[in-house]
Amino acid sequence: MLIVKKFGGTSVANKERMYNVANRCIEDYKKGNDVVVVLSAMGKYTDELIDMAKDMNPNPPKREMDMLFTIGEQMSVALMGMVMNNLGVPAISLNAFQVAMHTTSVYGNARIKRIDSERIRHELDQKKIVIVTGFQGINKFDDYTTLGRGGSDTTAVALAAALNADACEIYTDVDGVYTADPRKVPSARKLNQITYDEMLELATLGAGVLHNRSVELAKKQGVQLVVRSSLNTSEGTIVKEDAKMEKMLVSGVAADKDAARIALIGLKDEPGVAFRLFNHLARHNINVDMILQSVGRDSTKDISFTVAVDNADEAVEIVERHFHEYEKIDVEKNVAKVSIVGAGMMSNAGVAAKMFEALYDEGINIKMISTSEIRVSVLIDEKYTERAMNAVHDKFGLGDNR
Amino acid sequence: MLIVKKFGGTSVANKERMYNVANRCIEDYKKGNDVVVVLSAMGKYTDELIDMAKDMNPNPPKREMDMLFTIGEQMSVALMGMVMNNLGVPAISLNAFQVAMHTTSVYGNARIKRIDSERIRHELDQKKIVIVTGFQGINKFDDYTTLGRGGSDTTAVALAAALNADACEIYTDVDGVYTADPRKVPSARKLNQITYDEMLELATLGAGVLHNRSVELAKKQGVQLVVRSSLNTSEGTIVKEDAKMEKMLVSGVAADKDAARIALIGLKDEPGVAFRLFNHLARHNINVDMILQSVGRDSTKDISFTVAVDNADEAVEIVERHFHEYEKIDVEKNVAKVSIVGAGMMSNAGVAAKMFEALYDEGINIKMISTSEIRVSVLIDEKYTERAMNAVHDKFGLGDNR
């Protein structure tokens, strides 16, 4: 078997954890497997590098930022090489140049294009454990790029695809994917399996276990993922196309408090209004999430949309400066988005209604609704977030052991 | 003009010094010059990396050690890139992969073989200041190598040669090359010029301003060096083939306290004895510096030699274990080697005698003597080191302003 194992920053934050990771990899190696390990920078080292850079230049060029960032993972893999060798196992560390991890040219947010797996295969043939820097790549200019926060997950998936690996294991500090955040919903339950699409929706909704792009790539390349804890040996959650959801309509509940609602009242009810509004926002790089359009009084309409809290003031400013086709603008920052996700809901009417019922039972008002084929999201008052999550979780019986 | 400027760790140890270095480079750049900057790791960062490694594995593989070491210079160049950009000057940092700094394959002590200067020329053509990682290279396996302590000097010289630079400036924390260490010989004087060979002898003798190998390479490639201070704008010392020594016989005095003398008494006076002795030492990687053979009593001979203090005990052990052809062994650790260096002495008899006279005047006993074409070294009691240096320095009038 060829196994790709990815460990995040907290899993390699100090000497003890490094040895823990090394031993887990060596266990697989000693069973006769080929083992490729992908590591992130140790602990909060990437944040330290950012502080270092900002001290030198408050607005550092992204190209130089990536040149600086990549040393974090190189430190992890070199030290891990030393640890494994100290444990008597031949191991070799490789960076993005050595792996030939080709990416698009965008600094700070590159996408993997192609991996020349020759060097890795050569080292595996020499019976070495191969330790690869996550998060980094090289572009057509022969410059370092980085894949964005959490990009090491994507590195692992891309390597698993390029090497045609038998398993791709993502180690993290939680046991796997849960039906909801266990810190907020005490009855939350670990899922044994989940589909790529469900995982994607959960990742997008801030469930945060896996990097969004890594799930996309895994789906595209057909790489089966396992999300496991680096701290214990429990089974984890398998992410794959045909996950058996045990007749569950809904696989998880997620919440995102980083949302602000902007409402424009009294727009003319004519074509092109929405286009002009969102075009202004797009041109200023404001990402819009939920959008709601409703008929207002006297042949006018209202449009509400949500943006990240940090973007709210800028979004209002842009609207006020460039878009004059409304009567009134209204901003609400204390809102949260609560979502349910599940491949089962595609073929089941009534799922959304059941969610709304749960909220109604709790007396929680719904401000906006948005849906996809496998997701229903509602915007509510931020202070009711936990109550809403628990109510919905219970309503769908997600905590029950089936 | 194309100028290569090298700054050591102390010159880039913190933000203030980084900006100081940046401003010095920008000054040359604004005069219309092409500027290539070579940097070492910041301050004592390389030592920190060693500590980090030893904590993980007391005996880390050299290949992984080099993988770890190289992040030090990459940090320096990336941050310098940010600093220069903050000062409004386009600058780009490059590491050994990007510069294609090919070396021999020996980890920890590689030699530069070849530099593909294409990328650097391309960036210079874009009117950028190019900032290159010193000390590091890549070998035929596509692995990082390092050039040994002080290797950034060699990087600068190799780049100057590959780019056919008009100047190669080595910035350090002293003003230039002195006739002796000014902390020990108050009348020591800065030299305006010195030949490669003299500089080489001084470097070897522990004068420590320039990395030995960098001087060898500069001589071989005909690269004219300037040693200058990064802290002030004084002229520095020019190192070149036909340095004008202003009729000076001797250009400098150096001392090395890291020496121990081992004396073997009563060896048979027959062929092969010396070979067998030094062969044993060589096979155990003990470097021998001065060697003296003298006729003893009764058709025996005595052999004395010096080794680094740290190697003295091991050397004695090796001799006792493998070489049984002597009557008595004697070790002396409190000795120092004092040397004079000067291209002028080649054609001048009497230089050595003048040195011995200076020591005799001070009542200092000479234990061993060794000479090259441009150097005379004597071994003396360690406690007389400073006195001997000053006496010799005065005797040759090195402090006089001519």
Image (cartoon, coloured by chain):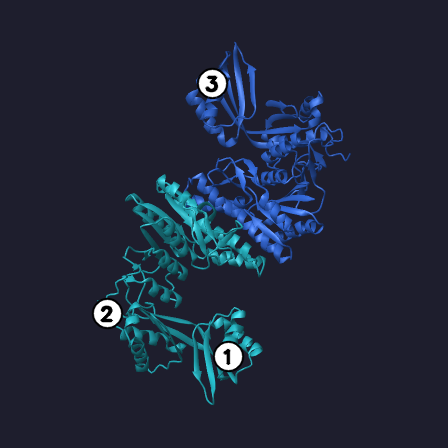
Chain colours: A cyan, B blue
Q: Which residue is mark 1?
A: A273
Q: CA distance from mark 2 to mark 1?
A: 47 Å
The answer to whether residue B169 of the structure is visible from this angle is yes
- Give how far across and how far down residue B231 sits, in percent: 66, 48
Under circle 3, the secondary element is: helix
Three-letter amino acid code at the position of disc 3: Arg
Chain letter belonging to callout 3: B
Mark-to-mark CA distance, 3 and 2: 83 Å
In terms of depth relative to the viewer, which is nearer, B181 or B24? B24
Location of residue A310 in the rendering, given as x and y in whole percent from the top left corner: 49, 71
Residue found at the very far front of the displayed protein: A271
Residue that badge 3 annotates: B276
Q: Which residue sits at x=42%, y=21%? A: B322
Q: Comparing marks 3 and 1, which lies closer to the viewer?
A: 1
Instruction: Read off the chain for label 1.
Output: A
Q: Please state which amino acid type lies under the numbered disc 1.
A: Val
| In front: label 3 or label 2 | 2
Q: Is the residue B282 above or below the residue B300 in the image?
A: below
Q: Residue furthest bottom?
A: A298
In this picture, residue B151 sits left or right of residue A396: right
Determine crowd level at label 1: few under 14, some 14-19, many 20+ residues with C-alpha closer than 10 A. some
Residue identifier under label 2: A400
